[in-house]
Image (tube, rainbow, N blue to C red):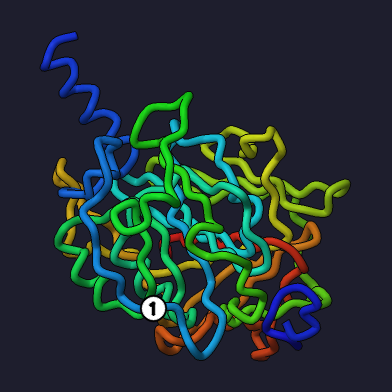
Amino acid sequence: MSTRRGAHGRRAATAAALLAATVTAALAAGCTAESGPGDDGRGSPKESKQGASPSATGPSALVVKIDNAAAARPHTGVDAADVVYAEQVEGGLSRLMAVYATRLPETVGPVRSARESDLELLRQFDRPTLAFSGAQKKLLPLIDKAPLRAETPGNAADAYFRGSGRPAPHNLFLRPERIVPKPPGEAALTTGFHYGPAPEGGTATNSRTVRYPAARFTFTWSDSRERWLVGMDGTPATTADGERMAAATVVVQYVKVRESAFRDFLGNNTPYTETVGSGKAQVLRDGRAWDVDWKREKATDGTAFTTGDDAPVNFAEGPVWVVFAKTP
């Protein structure tokens, strides 16, 4: 079977009152300590050197870190992503990482800061372009060394803008075509995913919920749309145009979530999501669920999802959402 998408047969008052408001907003957003200034709406983040130029050996996927606090919704452009990863961040909240290869929306956002575990996840792609608002100062050297092209408001100011109608830092948006002139194509999706006919068996499933300490995702099957409708924190997830966000395939991937070396300014540890290794997962497609195994031997590999007899598990054609859940 193909490991690509598409024709894939192969294939995020008083001074005291102001301070309290700032702390509350930052906690809700899951900010890290010493994030770049652009992450809180008071300017562009400290410029980070680009870790690498676009790859000369193959197409480069565009990856955007997306805010997922309640104040950041509805999202813009997330529905155009080929793959959306959901991860736990500080305070038990969630953040998204959207991967674009086959099409680029006019606008994406709100854009937020990067995390250490993002660098491991991104190694599966060939020198991807990572768009993000900033990062903790201690993390910037790791981003500099990573094999990726970093694009922030500090080095690509004309690609970002502040939207109206919502408070900072939940109002930073990206114009993708200003950093990636055209879609790189499905060959950039080196995820290891297989697409094709559904596996045999599976269990009829109408809805699946994944819970973080302070966030949750719910996916509800729609026969009419032949998609899993996305819900976040008990509310239907819609685009800025009012359309319901949906996925053709949902993967609940059980991983190790441990403490990292980083904390936010309130002292909350930044979780590190380990995506290299092996474990259990559940694949949802066509209104059914399969319990499967996953394996990613090294960071430069994609992730293989297999049945008990090591046969690849095919995904349905269309957007894939991968939700990282802590191994029980």
| Above or below: residue 165 compared with residue 54 | above
Instruction: Measuring from the top left, give residue 77's x and y in whole percent.
Output: 60, 48
Instruction: Measuring from the top left, give residue 145's x and y in whole percent.
Output: 25, 78
Q: Quadrant of residue 76?
A: top right
- The quarter of the rendered structure image containing the N terminus is bottom right
Q: Which residue lies under the disc numbered 1?
A: 53
Closest to the observer, 131 or 285: 131
Q: Furthest residue to the front?
A: 158
| Above or below: residue 170 compared with residue 79 | above
| Above or below: residue 191 compared with residue 166 | below
Closest to the observer, 261 or 156: 156
- Regarding residue 41, the answer to whether it shows in the image is yes
Q: Residue at x 21, y 49 (%)?
A: 35
Q: Quadrant of residue 273?
A: bottom left
Closest to the observer, 120 or 49: 49
- The quarter of the rendered structure image containing the C terminus is bottom left
Q: Quadrant of residue 242?
A: top right
Q: Residue at x 38, y 44 (%)?
A: 93
Q: Residue at x 46, y 44 (%)?
A: 173
Label 1: how many Cα within 10 Å (few below 14, some 14–19, many 20+):
some
| Above or below: residue 113 compared with residue 302 | above
Instruction: Measuring from the top left, give residue 161's x and y in whole percent.
Output: 43, 41
Residue type, label 1: Ser
Q: Furthest residue to the right?
A: 224
Looking at the rendered structure, the secondary structure element under dot 1 is: loop
Q: Residue at x 61, y 39 (%)?
A: 237
Left or right placement of residue 263 versus residue 26 in this view: left
User: How many marks can you see?
Assistant: 1
Instruction: Measuring from the top left, give residue 274's x and y in whole percent.
Output: 36, 72
- Regarding residue 95, the answer to whether it shows in the image is no
Q: Furthest residue to the left?
A: 15
